[in-house]
């Protein structure tokens, strides 16, 4: 077996201004996180109050409460394929706006519901808005930062290669 070459220490790389990592918390990212939190908060606050509203105001049975609460989830699942097509045909920001409008309008219409059937329809409508809004909101920010993330991953990989001695 031939003798191996002596091991030499790799030079310590320095970060130049052009290699500075991208900001993690961009303005769009923070706004997206805050809006997602507020949308989720409004939805989960309804989980506590809506069953009482159905039983006390609409005089619905406990089984009807379950159907009304489930209509939201069923519509969100059923709307997923078509919302993806809609977002691709128009734009993701337009889909985000439409979903946000539906998501805000539906709870306002809950006060106008005077029957269990109408409330179930409104919950179905609300679930569609939830799906369009939440299903695509994270993608809107992620696609904008995909290239930045790729560049940052490349820089980290190069940095680790230099320190691990695997650089060529």
Image (spheres, grey):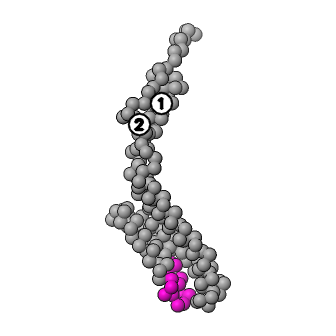
Residue furthest left in the image: 90
Q: How many marks?
A: 2
- From this view, report whether residue 23 is shown above or below residue 154: below
Q: Is residue 113 magenta?
A: yes
Give whichever of 51, 76 is nearer the camera: 51
Relative image position of residue 35 (x, y in whole percent): 47, 63
Relative image position of residue 117 (x, y in whole percent): 53, 87
What residue span does the magenta drawing correspond to? 110-124
Tag on residue 20? 2
- From this view, report whether residue 160 is shown above or below residue 105: above
Q: Quadrant of residue 49?
A: bottom right
- Taking the image as shown, residue 105 lies to the left or right of residue 54, namely left
Badge 1: few (under 14), some or many (20 or more) residues near its Cα, within 10 Å?
A: some
Give whichever of 12, 83 is nearer the camera: 12
Tag on residue 105? none
Q: Is residue 16 visible?
A: yes
Point out the tag, 2 or 1, that comes first from the N-terminus: 2
Look at the numbered disc 1 and give the secondary structure of its residue. helix
The quarter of the rendered structure image containing the N terminus is: top right
Q: Residue at x 54, y 26 (%)?
A: 164
Relative image position of residue 134 (x, y in whole percent): 48, 64
Q: Residue at x 48, y 35 (%)?
A: 156
Of badges 2 and 1, nearer the viewer stands 2
Relative image position of residue 24 (x, y in whole percent): 46, 47
The quarter of the rendered structure image containing the C terminus is: top left
Badge 2: few (under 14), some or many (20 or more) residues near its Cα, within 10 Å?
A: few
Cβ–Cβ under 8 Å for marks 2 and 1: no
Q: Residue at x 49, y 78 (%)?
A: 107
Tag on residue 159? 1
Give the Cα separation between the discs numbered 2 and 1.
Answer: 13 Å
Look at the numbered disc 2 and give the secondary structure of its residue. loop
Q: Magenta region's main secondary structure? A: helix
């Amino acid at each position: 077996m031939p003798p191996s070459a002596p091991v030499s220490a790799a030079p310590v790389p320095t970060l130049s201004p052009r290699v500075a990592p991208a900001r993690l918390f961009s303005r769009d990212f923070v706004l997206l996180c805050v809006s997602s939190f507020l949308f989720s908060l409004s939805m989960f606050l309804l989980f506590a109050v809506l069953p009482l509203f159905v039983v006390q105001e609409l005089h619905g049975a406990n089984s009807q409460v379950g159907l009304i609460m489930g209509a939201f989830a069923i519509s969100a699942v059923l709307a997923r394929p078509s919302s993806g097509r809609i977002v691709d045909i128009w734009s993701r920001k337009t889909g985000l706006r439409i979903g946000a409008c539906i998501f805000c309008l539906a709870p306002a219409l809950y006060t106008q519901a005077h029957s269990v059937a109408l409330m179930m329809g409104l919950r179905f409508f609300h679930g569609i808005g939830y799906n369009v809004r939440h299903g695509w909101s994270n993608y809107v920010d992620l696609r904008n930062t995909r290239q930045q993330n790729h560049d940052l991953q490349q820089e980290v990989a190069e940095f680790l290669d230099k320190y691990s001695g695997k650089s060529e």
